[in-house]
Amino acid sequence: MGAAGSVLAQQRQVSPEQPSIMNDEDDDQTPTIPPPQPAKPARPRMQMAAPALEPDPNLDTEDQLAPSQVQQPMPAAVPMPTRGTGGAGRTTRAAAHATDPAEEGRVAGRPTRSLGTYVVACSGVFGKDSSHVKLAAAFAAKNIAYTQVDTASGNKVMASVLFAKNPKRRLEVWWSKPESRSDTHLIVINGQSNWAAPGELRLGLTLAEVEKLNHKPFKLSGFNKDNIATLSDWNGGELAAPPGGCTVGISLRAAPTTSAAALGGLPADREFTSAAAVMRAANPTVSEILVAY
């Protein structure tokens, strides 16, 4: 009888939410069947919230940010442009069309903005240790594309392009480690972009305006076949060593009204000062800015 009572006691351990089918009992009493209990009204079913979508385990972190980016081929290595004293000695490059959507939206962690101009600093998301992932986090994944851009030699490299379909906000970022899209190598401002480089450099500035920012004249080459002159030396001016360890280079395009005779006196294989009368007569303006590490 003791053993039977023990077994029955174990059977009485039911969920507190369910009615017991056994009477309370003593160890020396025989259990009796309780009278029928009235049925409880059925509980209404609770509506369960749909489960949150979980990341696809087959995608890596970058592709979780922007799945469309996996459509872009990832090269094993990318040739980097050469850089001269004070900047990159390259001609103006045509802007490449991005293959990923780059719609504008509200930007989180936006860099300094003044009078419609977005500023590149040699720190933060534009520092040497930046990456495609950091740019996507700062500007939203929909506003960045990993796509091909043109080089001065006519080849193409892969780069992260901010606001690729908005000419006034477009910005290229090239990577020293393209396989991981990290380690900033070059930031390119060209076309109609409103972005400004360190020292308040921006597209469209004249020689006199650049000299004012540099606090002194600078040196540049003569004009090539595309009527482009390239910075060769900031001449120890304010723009020679921006904070953050980067260097800044510029290209300048001669005014369309400059005569062929005037350009002929400014050959690309010679160096001139920005204060030279013959260079001022060509009235060039900044057509491309390069921020390099």
Image: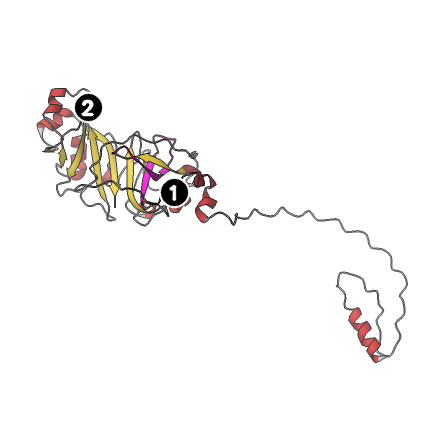
Residue at the (46%, 48%) spot, across then down: 60
Nearest to the eye among marks 1 and 2: give it: 1
> Which of the two labelled residues, at mark 1 and mark 2, occupies the earlier sequence position?
1
- Report helix, strand or loop for mark 2: loop
Lateral position of residue 152 relative to residue 280, left or right:
right
The alpha-carbon separation of the residues under discs 1 and 2 comes to: 39 Å
Residue 115 sits in which quadrant?
Answer: top left
Is residue 273 depicted above or below 124 in this figure? Answer: above
Quadrant containing the N terminus in the rendered view: bottom right
What amino acid is found at the position of numbered circle 2 in the picture? Ala
Residue 230 sits in which quadrant?
Answer: top left
In the image, residue 174 lies in the stretch drawn in magenta? yes
Disc 2 residue crowd, few under 14, some 14–19, many 20+, Cα 10 Å: few
Is residue 192 depicted above or below 68 in this figure? Answer: above
x then y, percent, for residue 197: 26, 39
Lateral position of residue 41 relative to residue 187, left or right:
right
x then y, percent, for residue 77: 32, 44
What amino acid is found at the position of numbered circle 1 in the picture? Met
**Highlighted magenta segment, given as a residue range:** 153-176
Mark sitting on residue 255: 2
- Report helix, strand or loop for mark 1: loop
- In front of the other: 33 or 110: 33
Residue 163 sits in which quadrant?
Answer: top left
x then y, percent, for residue 30: 89, 75
Mark sitting on residue 74: 1
In the image, residue 80 lies in the stretch drawn in magenta? no
Disc 1 residue crowd, few under 14, some 14–19, many 20+, Cα 10 Å: some
Q: Are marks 1 and 2 in contact (CB under 8 Å)?
A: no
x then y, percent, for residue 108: 41, 43
Lateral position of residue 8 relative to residue 233, left or right:
right
